[in-house]
């Protein structure tokens, strides 16, 4: 285990890990505290006949001498009255803090278990990593996988949008439907020619009333057929001007893929930003 894995832990997971470490290293009667009246104390326990208070600080920023003094001052004024204080932090102990503790400047004996000590204890007993550390590693792998899927989905959507846009400028290959439209146009022209011929016949047979009525009936039928054919032709033209079903389906699919990709990517980014904010919080 390395420090990168350690920083993947949430504050709650790091606190759980610290409880395991302390129990495995001789701290008995470990009790969770976490009450506001205890000034940030996370655990209490017994070690060598003394009452020990444990304060957990999961952060990257090192503790300062003034912070430790404030912690000790608040602890002495609380209902928790330990014989000594153990601070477990995922940060590195500075030389100034180590010197202050070595010189006994604090009113209360303070021991600090820093990042290097925690990693050493975990290396000595890998079984302690099965809980919170395993969960953190699984979460990190899932985030990497989701980020990868999200990136691939976004790229696929962008390529699809580009391909869809390019297709608008490419002359489509004539389809059977286009040939049918041309046939309809030819039929309309033939009907128009037929109409002209019927007009001529009507004039020639105007001498006979019966023939005239027959010609008029045929003429009206031809007019209706022409109107019906022109309406069908207009409907076909209108259908061609509309977006084809496969383009509509493609647009919906690309929008769905882009939405899922954006959601996965945003989820991973938010989770990592939240973790970094927790590690940077000096009061964590």
Image (tube, helix red, strand yellow):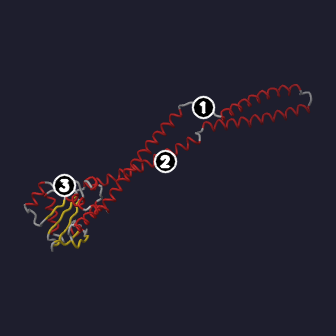
Locate residue 275: give its quadrant. bottom left
Q: Are marks 3 and 2 in contact (CB under 8 Å)?
A: no
- SS type, badge 3: loop
Q: Could you tell me which residue is drawn at 71 percent across and 31 percent down? A: 183
Residue 150 or residue 208, whichever sits in front: 150
- In the image, residue 93 sits, relative to residue 107, either above or below, namely above
Q: Residues within 10 Å of mark 1 (few under 14, many from 20)?
A: few
Locate residue 29: give its quadrant. bottom left
- Label annotation for residue 141: none
Query: How far is disc 3 from disc 2 in space, using C-alphas?
Result: 46 Å
The residue under label 1 is 173
Query: How far is disc 1 from disc 2 in space, using C-alphas?
Result: 29 Å
Q: Residues within 10 Å of mark 2 (few under 14, many from 20)?
A: some
Q: Nearer the viewer, mark 3 or mark 2?
A: 3
- SS type, badge 2: helix
Task: State the image coordinates of residue 131 (x, y, percent, origin top left).
Answer: 32, 63
Mark 3 and mark 1 lie on one chain; the one further toward the N terminus is 3
- In the image, residue 83 sits, relative to residue 144, either above or below, namely below
The residue under label 3 is 92
- In the image, residue 196 sits, relative to residue 11, either above or below, namely above
Query: How far is disc 3 from disc 1 in space, using C-alphas?
Result: 69 Å
Task: State the image coordinates of residue 282 (x, y, percent, origin top left).
Answer: 22, 56
Q: Could you tell me which residue is drawn at 86 percent across and 32 percent down? A: 215
In this rendering, position of residue 169 left or right of residue 51? right
Of the 4 image quadrants, the one containing the N terminus is bottom left
- SS type, badge 1: loop
- In the image, residue 88 sits, relative to residue 172, either above or below, namely below
Mark 3 and mark 2 lie on one chain; the one further toward the N terminus is 3
The residue under label 2 is 256
């Amino acid at each position: 285990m390395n420090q990168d894995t350690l920083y993947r832990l949430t504050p709650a997971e790091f606190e759980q890990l610290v409880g395991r470490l302390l129990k495995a290293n001789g701290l008995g009667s470990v009790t969770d505290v976490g009450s506001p009246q205890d000034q940030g104390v996370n655990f209490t326990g017994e070690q060598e006949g003394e009452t020990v208070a444990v304060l957990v600080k999961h952060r990257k920023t090192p503790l300062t001498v003034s912070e430790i003094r404030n912690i000790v001052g608040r602890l002495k004024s609380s209902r928790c009255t330990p014989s000594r204080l153990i601070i477990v932090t995922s940060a590195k102990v500075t030389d100034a803090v180590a010197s202050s503790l070595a010189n006994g400047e604090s009113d209360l004996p303070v021991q600090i278990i820093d990042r290097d000590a925690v990693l050493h204890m975990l290396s000595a007993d890998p079984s302690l990593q099965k809980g919170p550390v395993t969960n953190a590693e699984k979460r990190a792998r899932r985030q990497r996988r989701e980020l990868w899927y999200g990136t691939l989905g976004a790229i696929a959507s962008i390529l699809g949008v580009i391909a869809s846009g390019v297709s608008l400028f490419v002359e489509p290959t004539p389809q059977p439907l286009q040939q049918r439209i041309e046939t309809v146009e030819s039929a309309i022209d033939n009907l128009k020619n037929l109409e002209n011929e019927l007009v001529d016949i009507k004039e020639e047979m105007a001498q006979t009333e019966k023939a005239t009525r027959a010609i008029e009936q045929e003429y009206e039928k031809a007019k209706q057929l022409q109107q019906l054919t022109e309406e069908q032709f207009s409907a076909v033209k209108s259908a061609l001007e509309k977006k084809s079903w496969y383009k509509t389906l493609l647009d919906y699919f690309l929008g769905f893929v882009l939405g899922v990709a954006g959601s996965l990517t945003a989820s991973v980014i938010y989770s990592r930003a939240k973790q970094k904010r927790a590690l940077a919080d000096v009061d964590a």
